[in-house]
Amino acid sequence: MQVICTDGTVFECRAYEVIDAGVMLFGEEADDQPDRYAGGREQIGYVPHHQLHYIIPEDVAVGPPEPGPARQPSAPQAGGEPAQR
């Protein structure tokens, strides 16, 4: 998953857990040191709620937004002022 913070920082994680103060981020199982975290995931980070912008799953493509339909400017009425909506 991609974690995107409000300051623009972006990094990867495998899982997350929401807690009262923020989001704990987890990486891969610690295979190289099996006794280090007995049966658990390795916590790789923490982001407070106010600094978290998005968590995006791996199967979602991230890119520039697609252009939407073009907005037509309102035509001026007689008298030169735009139409009221």
Image: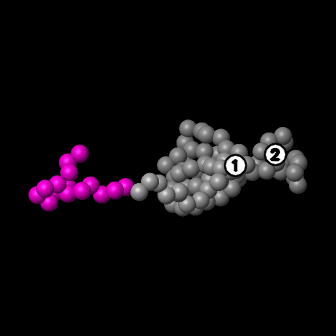
Residue bounds of the magenta highlight: 71-85
Residue in the image at 55% along x and 42% along y: 21
Residue in the image at 61% along x and 40% along y: 18
Toward which corner of the image does residue 20 lie, by quadrant? top right
Residue 58, compared with residue 64, is above or below; it is: above
Of the numbered discs in the image, which one, if any, rests on residue 15? none
Q: Which amino acid does label 2 sit on?
A: Tyr
28 vs 59, left or right, is right
Residue 76 in the magenta stretch? The answer is: yes
Q: In which quarter of the image is the C terminus?
A: top left
Q: What residue type is labelled 1?
A: Asp
Say whether residue 45 is visible: no
Residue 80 in the magenta stretch? The answer is: yes
Q: Position of residue 19 (x, y in %)?
A: 60, 39
Of the numbered discs in the image, which one, if any, rests on residue 37? 2
Secondary structure state at the residue bearing disc 2: loop
Residue under label 1: 59
Q: Tell which of 76 and 18 is nearer to you.
A: 76
| Dominant SS type (magenta) | loop
Q: How many marks?
A: 2
Query: Of label 1 and label 2, which has the lower sequence position?
Result: 2
Q: Tell which of 42 and 70 is nearer to you.
A: 70
Residue in the image at 13% along x and 56% along y: 78
Residue count near mark 2 (Cα–Cα under 10 Å), binned few <14, some 14–19, many ≥20: few
